[in-house]
Image: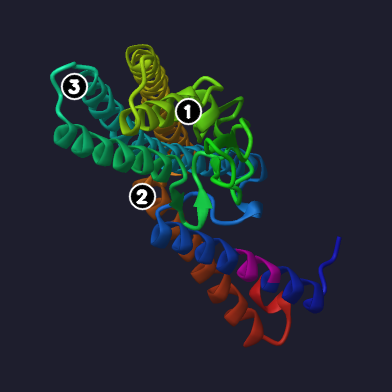
Amino acid sequence: MRITDSQFTTMMTRAMMNSNVEINRVAEQIATGNKINSLSDDPSGSMKLLSLDKTISSAEQYSSNISNVQSKYSEYETYLMSVNDLVLDVHDLLLQANNATVGEESSGGIIAELESLRQQALDTFNKKSDGIYIFSGTDVYSEAIIVDDSTDPVSYSFGGNADHRNTKISEDGSMNSNFTVQETLQGSLDFFTTLDAAIAELKNPTENKNAILGAAIDSADATQKSILNTVTILGANYNSLDRMAVNNADAVLYAETVKTDINALDYAEASVRLTESMNTLQASQSVFAKVMTSSSLFDLM
């Protein structure tokens, strides 16, 4: 089949363009160190890389979530242990007040301390962080414990709710990121009501003093156990989060390794391809130049 001048020109132009494309592609690979820089480089490999990038992004997000939850746990632990210390002080003061040898002056000091500790415990359970009540479940704009001082004696009730806010920490796992006053006190506000009764009794002693103070002491014991139980659960959850963080880090490391296997450039092989493409281009340009300076293809035959 006879090839015309125009056909030859088209063929040579296309060949030089292809060589230029390949040179640019290899040059980009060498510059980035990646075999795949666009979908057209390797459609199948590109899809694998996209999937691996998604895995890495998800794992890193889960790790960030874990870090946030652990930070909140540390905050909860601080407040819970603070209340635990307050309850211990209440317990010790009630034992001291229940001693028959306590005088009126000492009793007055104990009453003042008990009232202060009661308020500190209430303030802690109604603590806010970033503008929300942290012990109020998912109803974060309501107080955890509501005090109604219009009644005699003062009445207490739970505000908020007992619901948990769950945070995703893995592809198929989540962890509650909050603790509520209702679970911490096991649904009972006896600590405050019995403490108020004990304070009232110390202000105006009756023959029921031992029984009333004894009930407050028992309630303080039960409250401390309940708080420490919550702290134990918190600690177990924290350890689980540590293990999950390690798993997520391993997932990122594995995905990064696979990405490297798929996409890492063999510089020696790329250098050979670059040289071959440049030689091909130079040869094509040389032939094309000769054709352009000849009157006909037959002159080159």
Task: Provide the residue designation for mark 2.
Answer: 267
Residue drawn at (47%, 34%), measured in percent from left and top?
255
Left or right, 247 with reference to 87: right
Task: Provide the residue designation for mark 1.
Answer: 193
Task: Provide the residue designation for mark 3.
Answer: 96
> Three-letter amino acid code at disc 1?
Thr
| 97 lies above or below 5 | above
Secondary structure of residue under mark 3: helix
> Three-letter amino acid code at disc 2?
Tyr
| Range shown magenta | 14-18
Secondary structure of residue under mark 2: helix
- Asked if labels 2 and 1 touch by Cβ distance under 8 angstroms, the answer is no
Dot 1 or dot 2, earlier in sequence: 1
Residue 29 % position (x, y)? 46, 57
Image quarter in which the N terminus is found:
bottom right
Distance between the Cα atoms at labels 1 and 2? Answer: 77 Å
Residue 177 % position (x, y)? 51, 35
Q: Nearer the viewer, residue 156 or 135?
A: 156
Residue drawn at (63%, 64%), measured in percent from left and top?
18
